[in-house]
Image (cartoon, rainbow, N blue to C red):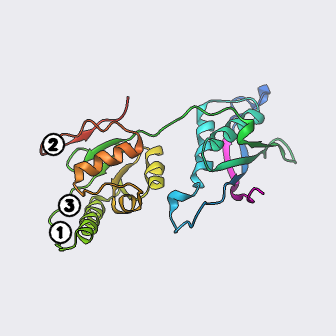
Amino acid sequence: MSPIPDRIFLHDHVVEVEIGAFQLERGLLQRIRFNVDVDIAPPAGPLDDDVDRILSYDRIHEAIGAELAAGRLNLLETLAENIARRILAAPQALAVTVRIEKLDRGPFVLGVEIRRSREQVAPLDSDPIRPRIVMAGAEPQPGTIICPVATATLHSEVPENQRRIDLLALDQAAWALAGAEITVAATRTEIDWAMRRGGIVAWAPSRMVLDAVQGPATTDPEALAQWLAAELGADHGGISSQAGSRVLPPTA
């Protein structure tokens, strides 16, 4: 027997958009309400309170935003189908129900509701996030991840203890970079969230490195930047060993 799926949802999300097939709907903003439920595969093991092991609610919100930004549509049905396809591109998503309602067409609510499973929709073209990875000291731009460099740390005679100390020192260095324009990210989900919004991230590496099944044994900052680039699917051939600004370019 197949396990009963879990479910995440976004309800009562109201935005103003221009949509509709009738001439009177052109040039007119209408309030549209979204209710989206996503069936997801239950976790194979303990979650360990790890955000990278779940499907983020932001996936739903971003799917709606991406489709609304893609261009004007005539039909709610088309919008619902496109949102469903985006959400079902996530590996955890098994099925999705998308309900869209027009709130301003009269003293009633008009709308459409669809339910789609992964087997029913055509695969969505991949839309990978390929951030620009830089070492601390380079000039950060929107869409970049800064890999910190730590100063001297405490010393331990136990190699694994020293590894953790060094990683925590890098986390501290990341937090020292944080500010109004730079946020600290410790997980893939946090990185993805910031990159999709064109943010600048200071990477706190300890959690990802220590949680990785085959994580890097080294704590050298440039080696960790190379590892992160490989994990995120970016080009990892551009980090210089020279002092000063060091930049890892994005994949073309």
Residue 234 screen position, x and y as percent: 37, 38
Q: Residue at x 50, y 64 (%)?
A: 50
Callout 1 amino acid: Thr
Q: What is the magenta range?
A: 1-16
Nearer-N-terminus badge (1/2): 1
Q: Compare residues 17 and 60 and report the one nearer the observer.
A: 60
Residue 92 screen position, x and y as percent: 62, 50
Counting other residues with Cα less than 10 Å from the Cα at mark 2, is it few (<14), some (14-19), or many (20 or more)?
few
Q: Residue at x 74, y 32 (%)?
A: 78
**Which dot marks residue 241?**
2
Q: Is residue 35 visible?
A: yes
Q: Residue at x 30, y 39 (%)?
A: 236
- In the structure shown, which secondary structural element does the residue marked by tag 2 occupy? loop
Q: Are marks 1 and 3 in contact (CB under 8 Å)?
A: yes
Q: CA–CA distance between discs 1 and 2?
A: 21 Å
**Which dot marks residue 150?**
3
Q: Is residue 91 magenta?
A: no
Q: Residue at x 73, y 38 (%)?
A: 119
Counting other residues with Cα less than 10 Å from the Cα at mark 3, is it few (<14), some (14-19), or many (20 or more)?
some
- Residue where numbered disc 1 is placed: 153
Q: In the shown orientation, is residue 211 left or right of residue 167?
A: right
Q: Is residue 140 visible?
A: no
Looking at this view, name the residue that lies furthest to the left. 243
Q: In the shown orientation, is residue 22 left or right of residue 50?
A: right
Q: Compare residues 67 and 48 and report the one nearer the observer.
A: 48
Looking at this view, name the residue that lies furthest to the right. 107
Callout 2 amino acid: Ser
